[in-house]
């Protein structure tokens, strides 16, 4: 079968960073067990959720559970702190074995895209730091949703979903 395009996720597919991103959610909230349970419950229910949705949901659930956030940080401040910590950690996370070779080989066959829940500017910076920008046609990050990205790529590639991997 011939493919016109290949779409890759970033974290956990090209880069060994899924664990770092998961663990950092715990770092932006108090470390006590009750708080950690709420973080774990929200992440279990939405493991691929965007920080822009997950962090406010965690704070809301903590409030509902009567767990005070005494640092009085806003959701936006927590999102920013999470973003800064994750950007630096993911930048040094190792590429998964064969990831760069796979991008190069896919590039020889057709269009190559990266789609992630990582905010688009940060994702582009991470891809650029690795020297992978020349290997991809476009990078799609938050606020794009993965399913919307794939739909758009399928349309751009002639509307035949079987030709997009």
Image (tube, rainbow, N blue to C red):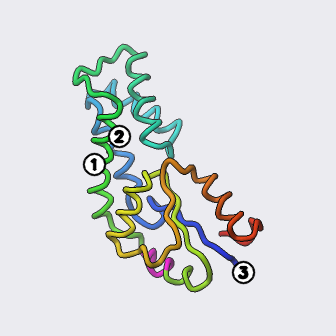
Mark drawn on residue 2:
3
Look at mark 1 in the image and give the residue it sits on: 84
Measure how far apart labels 3 and 2 are at the Cα level.
40 Å
The image quadrant of residue 99 is: bottom left
**Magenta span:** 97-103
Overall secondary structure of the magenta section: helix
Dot 3 surroundings within 10 Å: few (below 14), some, or many (20 or more)?
Answer: few
Find the residue positioned furthest to the top: 66
Look at mark 2 in the image and give the residue it sits on: 25
Is 107 situated left or right of 88 in this image? right
Which residue is at the front of the view, 116 or 18?
116
- Dot 3: element: loop
Dot 1 surroundings within 10 Å: few (below 14), some, or many (20 or more)?
Answer: few
Q: Nearer the viewer, mark 2 or mark 1?
A: 1
Q: Nearer the viewer, mark 3 or mark 2?
A: 3
Measure how far apart labels 3 and 1 are at the Cα level.
40 Å
């Amino acid at each position: 079968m011939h493919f016109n395009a290949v779409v890759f996720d970033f974290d956990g597919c090209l880069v060994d960073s899924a664990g770092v991103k998961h663990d950092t959610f715990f770092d932006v909230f108090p470390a006590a067990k009750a708080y950690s349970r709420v973080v774990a419950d929200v992440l279990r229910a939405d493991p691929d959720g965007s920080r822009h949705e997950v962090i406010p949901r965690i704070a809301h659930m903590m409030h509902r559970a009567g767990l005070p956030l005494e640092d009085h940080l806003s959701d936006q401040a927590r999102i920013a702190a999470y973003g800064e910590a994750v950007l630096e950690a993911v930048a040094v996370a190792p590429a998964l074995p064969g990831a760069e070779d796979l991008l190069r080989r896919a590039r020889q066959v057709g269009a190559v895209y990266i789609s992630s829940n990582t905010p688009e500017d940060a994702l582009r910076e991470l891809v650029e730091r690795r020297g992978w920008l020349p290997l991809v046609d476009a990078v799609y990050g938050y606020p794009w949703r993965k399913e919307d990205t794939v739909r758009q790529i399928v349309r751009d590639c002639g509307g035949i979903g079987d030709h997009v991997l």
